Image (tube, helix red, strand yellow):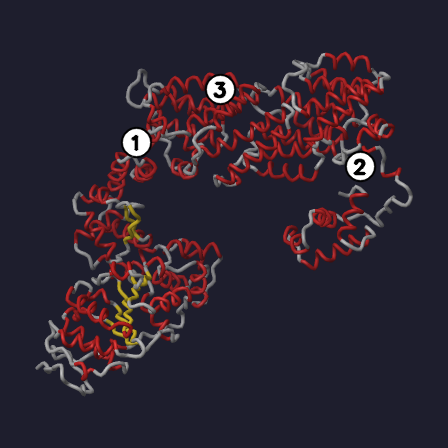
Amino acid sequence: MPRPTTGGHPDPPSEAFAPNGDPVLAARFSVPGLPQTFVRRPRLTERLTQGVRGPLTLVNGPAGAGKTLLVADWIAQGHAPGPPAWLTVAAEDNGPGVFWTYVLESLRRHGLAARGDIGSPAQPGEVDHSLLTRLAAELSARAEPVVLVLDEFDRVGTSAAVAGELQFVLRHAGDGLRLLIISRTEPLLPLHRYRAAGEATDIRGADLAFRPEETAELLDRHGMHLSDDGTRALTERTAGWAAGLRLCTLAAQGSDDPEAFLKDFEAGRSTLADFLLAEVLDTQPAETQNLLLRTSVLEQIHPGLANALTGGDDAEAILAGLERANAFVESIGHSWYRLHPLFAEILRVHLRVRDPGLEAELHRRAARWLSRAGQLAEALPHAADAGDWEQAATWFVDGLAIGRLLTGLDSEHLDALFSRMPPDASGPAADLVRAARELAHHDLERGLGHLDRAERAVPEGDGPGTPALRLSCALLRVLAARMTGSADRAEAAADDVTAAGHGIPAENLARHPELPALVLTDLGSAQLWAGRLDAARSSLADAVKADGGPDTALPRHECLSRLALIDFLNGWPGRAESHAREALAEAERSGLPPDASTGTAQLVLAAVAIDHDDLEAARTRLDHAASATLPRDPLVSAGLTLLRSRLLLARGHPRAALRLLEEQRRCPTPGEPSPWVNDRTALTMAAAYLADGRAQAAREVLQEAMGTPGPENVIAAARAHLATGDGEAAQDLLDTLPVGQGEGPAITVRALLARAQTADALGDPAEAQRLVARALAVARPERLRRPFLESGPWLRRLTRRRPELTRGHDWLPEWLAGHTPAEHTAEASPAPVTEPLSRREQEVLERLAQMMSTEEIAADLYLSVNTVKTHLKSLYRKLSASRRGEAVRRARELHLL
């Protein structure tokens, strides 16, 4: 028989009984022990310590999240502000009498309250309110608070009576009670009040999830080590779920290669699956199980989409209930949900076993629902998984998304998706997708083959989808024309894009700003290659004005880079540098990966650095340009060769520069030749021939390139005549130079210096001096040193005769100030180095001149600090210096910097 108890037993029996007569189970009062592999997480125990300063702390998360062990460890560390009482709640505690019997017994067994002073419930299903009042009064009178831990509280979470009584005691116990609830679901307490008052602390599933460094420690405690990437991948796959991590680790312990094992681990056929199916799926009603299994094919779940897969109309209530129950379903806002990744993986395996063949149909339904909802990017993978490739390609092209294969955040994902499209997928849309992929990968021949086939299959008239097909074909034609360097074909195709756009609603076009941005970028690039610089500037500038979203980031970056090149070709290095830096800033601001950016901006900055005579900076910029993945762009390929040859020439290696240029002439880029590339090649070759003392060869190479001579060609030809002693011919050529045609300072300075050299050769030193003075004034704002360095010995002789010409121009090389290092007085002449510097010592010296610390030099060169100190000692000895500043000064005097 049940042992009757009343509120007046001052001395409880040593063996306690519940109101239903069952003995109280002592094991439910024990704080669980910690396994040896337990990972202590200070970030969470500190949250608990802070939380129990207030009345209510909730540790809320799914099964296996590590909730119980976290609190047990916190108690074991002694962080509780007062004596703790532990109770593991059971399902039978739904009866208030049973629940409070166990609470009181927990307090008694932990020495926190004399149950006889308070009384005991007499009935399993109810408790006398006066008992709760006496309990609250006794707790409120305590000098230090009691921490009551209720583990697995979700087992009585549906009992409104228990929740109401617990709220009464908590509210009236004051500072004498700290309630710590561990649960899979939120209790029926008035949590909003506690949270609004700042009196509740929540530790949720996201907080309980392991971080990669915590995963690494867990693995270590199991005697296992993974690489950082392997640890991160395991953490992401399990979403940091504690039980999942432990079970995966245990499964991998017997493997010779744990990292490879975990990478290929089939969670759906493991103890993980057994755990989740038993703890989560099997505990749900049949309709909930059906929804979970069918929605496991989705990345994200909307109630409407779930109903489309199940054929029901109750998904909204089911999903909300699963989310509240922490049943591995997470709300991600705006009525969308997400399954835990491991749970979804296991459910998919279970679905294939239970309903073979259903998965493809579910993907097909999902694709249709998402397409109707306007979510094309989400619909496409489902159509692909259903095998509906023609439908996927048609939706893609009809949605004007063809440009997304060429630019934007989704380009790699879409490329990977359509790489799976089988060869038997037919229709113009499928061929257009293939063409876009091949052209994006720079395979012009295959791309044009698919594009030709697509164009032949486009229906006549303006039926549904036809304008989008025509626009997509024309867009890819512009790209193909750019790749072949044909400005005429690019301009014609761009007109076709405009014409096709007239048949498409304006609001549809407005949703795709990448389309005009791509057309203008490719058009401007083709015009630039063809030497139509004004037209190219207009096209590229219009593209830069495109919407500033991620889908237009790459076109904007490319256009700014090419605008910089146009500025440089027109002789405006300052403007060119500004545009190039803006292009690089756009790439960084938009998060473009390094392998997605063009090398053109780096080429322009290298060219400007050469004009500044900063040759090391130029070399670094060229290395950056060469590392870009777009050197297959003929513009980048040609630019690299031209600037590398200019750099060799600037360093005094004209024959090496000529060999490089001859190689380019023997292996021209495919497609139509570029007039300005040919001109620049001829100009650089002529300069190399002149530097090598072969003036006649310089004249010949320039005559071959004199189709439509520009000012720089005329200047170079005049210099070649001067080198052969024909000043009159040089004068005649220079008299043909146009004036006031918008030429920039780089061209103006070279023209003035050529005129000055001609005047000097023709016996007019006063005119020569006047022209040099003008050249210096024009060059000074841009710091254009290279034109003066390339002018030859006549300029040195002139500045030695008239040193006042360079007075105040401290930006010039020292020898142009009217003296050379050899002419310094004996006292001022620097002693030569005792022995040449090694390559590594030269690298250290260059960084020393940049005011870098020893530690910074070591980090930059990937050396140890001690190794750098050794190089510094050697440097000081060779330069006869005792301090950094002295070493740098001596190096500059000796032209080592």
Query: Residue at image x 25%, y 74%?
Result: 87
Q: Please, what is the three-letter code of the amino acid marked with disc 2?
A: Glu
Q: Which mark is residue 490?
A: 3
Mark 1, secondary structure of its residue: helix
Q: Quadrant of the N terminus?
A: bottom left
> Earlier along the polypeptide chain: callout 3 or callout 1?
1
Mark 3, secondary structure of its residue: helix
Which residue matches tag 1?
A: 391
Q: Is residue 551 above or below residue 848?
A: above
* Image location of residue 140, percent across then percent down: 25, 76
Query: Residue at image x 19%, y 57%?
Result: 284
Q: Is residue 593 above or below residue 275?
A: above
Which residue matches tag 2?
A: 814
Measured Cα–Cα span from mark 3 to mark 1: 30 Å
Measured Cα–Cα span from mark 3 to mark 2: 50 Å
* Image location of residue 359, percent across then percent down: 26, 44
